[in-house]
Amino acid sequence: MTTIAVVTAGLSQPSSTRLLADKLAAATRSVLPDVEIEVIELRDLAVDVTKNMLTGFPSPALRAAIDTVTAADGLIAVTPVFTASYSGLFKSFFDVLDQKALDGKPVLIGATGGTERHSLVLDFALRPLFAYLRAEPVATAVYAASSDWASPGDLDTRASRAGREFASRLAGAPVAAPDSGFVPFEQLLAGG
C-alpha cells in the first residue's frame, strides 16, 4: 500500500493550512483510493522540535513523526507564510530530519497566506528547501490566499491538478495530460 505523510504547520485550530493539506490529500486520494495518509500537525510538536534543536535528541512523539515522514512513499508539506517565507516551525522540523531522509521522495508543496502577493513563496522558498533535501516536488504547487476560501472553485481546480500529478508520481506513471487546465493562447484571446 502507498503511504503519504502530510506535514502541516498551521498554528491555529482549525487552520487554513490544515484545510489546504486535507484538500491536497483528498485530491490525491481521488486518484489513488487505496493510499494510506498520516497527518502530522507540527503545532503539537513545537516544543519537541525546539528541544531536539537544542539537545539533538528527539522525543518519542517527534521520533514517531520523523519515522512517518522518512518511511512514507510521498510527502504533502503545507506551511503558512510568515514574513514572505515558510514558518520557523516548518523549517525547524525539516532541519531535524536526517539530510538524506527525503532523497528522491515525491513531494506536493502548498502554502497559505492572507494575500495572493505571497504566492511566490512556493518557488522561492519551498522548492529550494526541498531541492536541498533532494526531494522531488511535483510541478504544480498550491497556494491558498484568504480570498480563495470564499469562492474555492479555482482552488479546487488547482488542488485537483496537483493531486493528479502527485498520484501519478507515486504510482510511477507519467502525469496525465487530460484536464490539465492548460488553455491555448488563442482561446484566451477569444474569451474562453
Image (spheres, rainbow, N blue to C red):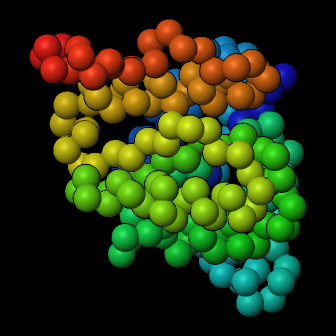
List x then y, in percent, for residue 121. Answer: 43, 60
Q: Residue furthest top?
A: 178
Q: Which residue is depicted at the point 37% across and 70% down?
A: 84
Can residue 13 be seen by looking at this rendering? no
Can residue 174 be seen by looking at this rendering? yes
Q: Relative to the observer, which residue lies in front, 42 or 147?
A: 147
Q: Is residue 89 above or below residue 24?
A: below
Q: Is residue 122 above or below residue 62?
A: above
List x then y, in percent, for residue 86. Answer: 48, 66
Q: Quadrant of residue 173?
A: top right
Q: Is residue 180 above or below residue 4?
A: above
List x then y, in percent, for residue 142. Answer: 44, 42
Q: Is residue 94 left or right of residue 164?
A: right
Q: Which residue is depicted at the point 85% across and 79% down?
A: 57
Q: Relative to the observer, which residue lies in front, 168 or 14?
A: 168
Figure quadrant of the C terminus: top left
List x then y, in percent, for residue 33. Answer: 66, 14
Total marks shown come to 0
Q: Residue furthest bottom?
A: 54
Q: Is residue 181 left or right of residue 128?
A: left
Q: Is residue 141 above or below residue 112?
A: above
Q: Which residue is depicted at the point 46% across and 23% down?
A: 160
Q: Quadrant of residue 108?
A: top right
Q: Relative to the observer, which residue lies in front, 152 or 58?
A: 152
Q: Residue furthest front?
A: 186
Q: Which residue is depicted at the point 59% across and 50% down?
A: 77
Q: Is residue 22 left or right of residue 174?
A: left
Figure quadrant of the N terminus: top right
